[in-house]
């Protein structure tokens, strides 16, 4: 693990804050990773992503292997050079998108054969190929290939899928090999079944990873089920390694997960919602399409430091959302990512002071309105 | 005309360079005005537009009157405040878009009644209302309402339309009244008929304007016809006032027009082309969709200072264009506007040295390839 080190500087209950050191820069935790699916965080320039406070991005192996292709990106100097982002990048293994986006999938012990959602072309992803692609991309944190069954699934389905995922995890780790300064993370599966989650965690620890992700959540289960699963699984993860909750979530999901010992997150919600005219603010979510904003000269979020909040009114944002202007996606994405980063930053500041719950409660209260 | 002053600092043949001073800042001429149709230059933040070198934007009265509405923008502090652009804004009168975009138009002496292309609602635009809207927007340079017949049109149609436009010009100027620091420009019509163009110019001089635009070009006529028209009309414009060629054009159109005495331009081509994957460079136009760029690590334009050229490869631009990513529109728009501004900047530097033709020839040669 040389060149990749996680140091926890303070804890508050189960919540932790610290820093992951990598040759490409520090990742302050808790960390939110904006999703840069196709070698771009949609509607943002790399410098703008950095301005939100992001230390690390996520790239999607599935999308990049299909277009423009991992070998092509490698030839062009790797993903960082290609997309103009010099700091750390975590890549997923492609497994989740193969299941959710591709067509005509066939899963065998060897791997998964599928057809591209873009042009129907046939592709094959195995643990070995998933790791090879991530290495070609130059990913700083590489994820094992796993199978992620949709929620709801029977216990038996989950158990069978889990067994396959653990065999694939072992092959993934072997394929990752030794890459100084790069890390390989395992993924805990097991659905909402505590004993399966624990079995998965134990199997991964046996293999030994630089970090441990919790997968298979954010697939439709209620927040309570997600939190219960975290309560059951996080205590079984090595405390000295980063804990990454994949694909989660809304602001209140994130703060609740931090209180349960999670260090890293990725999610398309702030970027996708931004493109749909929805903003996450200190007052909860706002739909800028709503006519009540049409003549409102006030900023989206008076406490926010982003370009949307410091230079434009709600009335302007309403106008450009209604007119379907690209600047609407640019401004609301910048805002949402800034808000997500600010929540992380507040948690990082609160944990050493024993105030993580206070921050989490405030965010949860703001977002409870949307649950009603 | 207090607070609005045009000073010519050098000439080179008919080409001129100088500065238009306004209370909101200087406009260096020759000037290219990016088009901010619906209170946004598509895919650009205001600060990014400024970085390209733009001193002034164009806003579209037609679009803004329909959505969000001139009275609403006025209530929100005017167009500059609304869209976050503090520097000068020129607004057109809406006449051209009423003719080209709206439905069920009825033109009378009084004005034009039409239906919105957005929601079918009925609206009325007269010279008085066009000027009222531009005043509500807070426009720095306001254009008279005119009628702009499509090319080709018979001489008789043009003559009749011209007579109406001249009566509307007089009413527009009267409606503009006295607005210190703001300017009102007349528009020369007359199609490709030199004697009608001259008649139009004389009529406008009689009324007296702060600047003179050449309208009714860039409607499908060949470049030679446009240049011949400029050769016929510009000598009849007051030399001490700014000359503005509306809606033109490609880089080689612009340089040719500057050689013929034009000081100001606006056009959607750089922004629209950028959203369609087309780039204007020192080598001519490039279609980034073309597969030959797929593995090209070189920049779009090695001499360009924009974000697209300094931070990304042609291969990346090809990828994001093909993937239909918003960043493609952002980067290519930034590039195209930067290139357009750099052409203006080079002309401004060349004119005092008597080298305007040299710059114009170089640009024309690069773009001649596309004409073939």
Image (spheres, coloured by chain):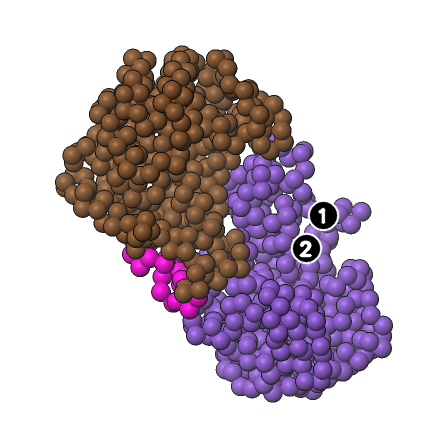
Chain colours: A brown, B purple
Residue behind mark 2: B251
Residue B301 visible: yes
Q: Quadrant of residue B356?
A: bottom right
Residue B185: give x, y in percent of width and height.
62, 77
**SS majority, magenta:** loop
Q: Is residue A305 left or right of residue A42?
A: left
Looking at the rendering, in which quadrant would you find the N terminus of chain A?
Answer: top left
Q: Quadrant of residue A19?
A: top left
- At 64% across and 35% down in the image, what residue appears? B293
Residue A126: give x, y in percent of width and height.
49, 17
Identify the magenta region: A294-314
Q: Is residue A168 magenta?
A: no
Which of these two is toward me, A283 or A312? A283
Q: Is residue B51 left or right of residue B200?
A: left
Chain letter of disc 1 in the image: B
- At 60% across and 78% down in the image, what residue appears? B130
- At 63% across and 45% down in the image, what residue appears? B277
- At 30% across and 22% down in the image, what residue appears? A197
Secondary structure, mark 2, is: helix
Residue B366 is marked as: 1
**Count of numbered tags:** 2
Q: Is residue A304 magenta?
A: yes
Q: What distance separates the C-alpha of mark 1 from that of mark 2?
A: 9 Å
Q: Is residue A181 left or right of residue B133?
A: left
Residue A246: give x, y in percent of width and height.
36, 32
């Amino acid at each position: 693990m040389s060149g990749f080190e996680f140091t926890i500087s303070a804890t508050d209950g189960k919540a932790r804050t610290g820093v992951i050191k990598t040759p490409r820069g520090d990742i302050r935790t808790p960390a939110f990773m904006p999703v840069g699916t196709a070698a771009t965080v949609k509607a943002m320039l790399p410098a703008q992503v950095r301005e939100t406070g992001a230390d690390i991005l996520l790239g999607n192996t599935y999308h990049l292997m299909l277009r423009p292709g991992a070998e092509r990106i490698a030839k062009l100097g790797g993903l960082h050079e290609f997309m103009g982002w010099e700091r750390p990048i975590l890549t997923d293994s492609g497994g989740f998108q193969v299941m959710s986006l591709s067509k005509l999938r066939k899963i065998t012990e060897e791997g998964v054969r599928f057809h591209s959602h873009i042009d129907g072309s046939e592709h094959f992803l195995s643990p070995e190929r998933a790791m090879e692609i991530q290495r070609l991309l130059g990913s700083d944190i590489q994820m094992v290939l796993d199978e992620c069954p949709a929620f709801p699934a029977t216990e038996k389905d989950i158990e069978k899928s889990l067994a396959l995922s653990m065999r694939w995890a072992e092959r993934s780790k072997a394929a990752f090999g030794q890459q100084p300064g790069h890390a390989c993370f395992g993924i805990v599966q097991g659905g909402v079944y505590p004993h399966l989650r624990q079995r998965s965690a134990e199997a991964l620890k046996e293999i030994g990873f630089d970090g441990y992700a919790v997968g298979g959540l954010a697939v439709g289960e209620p927040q309570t089920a997600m939190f219960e699963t975290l309560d059951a699984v996080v205590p079984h993860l090595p405390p000295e390694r980063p804990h990454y909750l994949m694909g989660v979530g809304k602001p209140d999901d994130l703060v609740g997960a931090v209180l349960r010992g999670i260090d890293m997150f990725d999610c398309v919600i702030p970027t996708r919602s931004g493109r749909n005219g929805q903003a996450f603010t200190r007052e909860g979510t706002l739909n800028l399409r709503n006519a009540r904003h049409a003549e409102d000269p006030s900023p989206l979020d008076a406490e926010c430091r982003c370009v949307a909040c410091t230079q434009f009114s709600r009335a302007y944002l309403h106008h450009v959302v209604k007119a379907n202007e690209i600047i609407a996606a640019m401004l609301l994405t910048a805002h949402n990512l800034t808000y997500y980063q600010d929540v992380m930053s507040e948690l990082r500041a609160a944990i050493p002071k024993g105030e993580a719950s206070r921050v989490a409660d405030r965010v949860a209260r703001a977002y409870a309105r949307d649950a009603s």
